Image (spheres, rainbow, N blue to C red):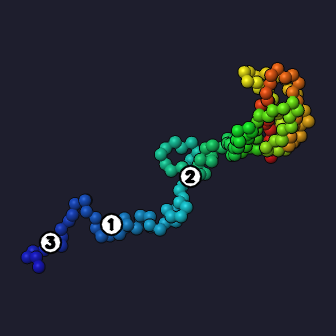
Amino acid sequence: MPSTFTPSSHTHDERYYTEAEIINLLAMKAPLSSPMLTGTPTAPNQATGDSSTRLATTAFVQAAIGDRRTVIETYNNGLSWYRKWSDGWVEQGGYNTGVNISVTLLIPFINTNYTIVGVGVSATNLDGTYSIYGKTATLFYIRKVQANNVEGCSWYACGYYI
């Protein structure tokens, strides 16, 4: 047992908290099992254009990118390819050989209002003349009109698929 006791009227400087202050401060902290911090965390949505270091929610990011279209799917097997866009646009292309070439599109278009470009390819340069005909939403034909050592035809088509 101590020989002397601190007088009951003593005071502490501001570095120390009273029991009541500690209880109040602990009551203000987020509980460890807070729904905002567990499972799928949530956060307040920041104002559009905020460039601070605050947390960006998915809603904030969606508002920031707006209606920009993005590539949602691609495919390439070495001879044909496609690229689908988020707004329903599709680009596709390929390489085929022959005189009368039937090209079945990898992704059907919604109608025949799409664009096709074909270029003849030889071992040394771009060459030859082609005619594109018989266009449907799912296929078209390429006919070699003038050969000039053409070995094949690269083609590109673009339009809406949905």
Q: Residue at x 69, y 43 (%)?
A: 74
Amino acid on which the number 1 mark rests in the picture: Glu
Name the residue beneath numbered marker 2: 57
* Location of residue 136 in the rendering, given as x and y in whole percent from the top left corner: 89, 40
- Numbered-mark total: 3
Residue bearing mark 1: 21
- Mark before the other along the chain sequence, 1 or 3: 3
Q: What is the C-alpha distance between the residues marked 2 and 3?
A: 54 Å
Q: Which residue is at a point 79% across and 34% down the rendered structure image?
A: 96
Tell which circle, 1 or 2, labels the residue nearer the N-terminal end.
Answer: 1
Q: Residue at x 79, y 43 (%)?
A: 106
Q: Residues within 10 Å of mark 2 (few under 14, many from 20)?
A: some
Residue type highlighted by circle 3: Thr
Task: Name the N-terminal-most of marks 2 and 3.
Answer: 3
User: Which residue is labeled 3 in the image?
Assistant: 6
* Marks 1 and 3 close (CB-CB < 8 Å): no
Q: Residue furthest bottom?
A: 1
Determine if residue 8 is in view: yes
The three-letter code of the residue at mark 2 reads: Thr
Residue 27 picture location, percent across and down: 40, 68
Residue 160, percent from left and from top:
80, 41
Q: Secondary structure at mark 2?
A: loop
| Vertical order, 37 against 65 (above or below) | below
Secondary element type, mark 1? helix
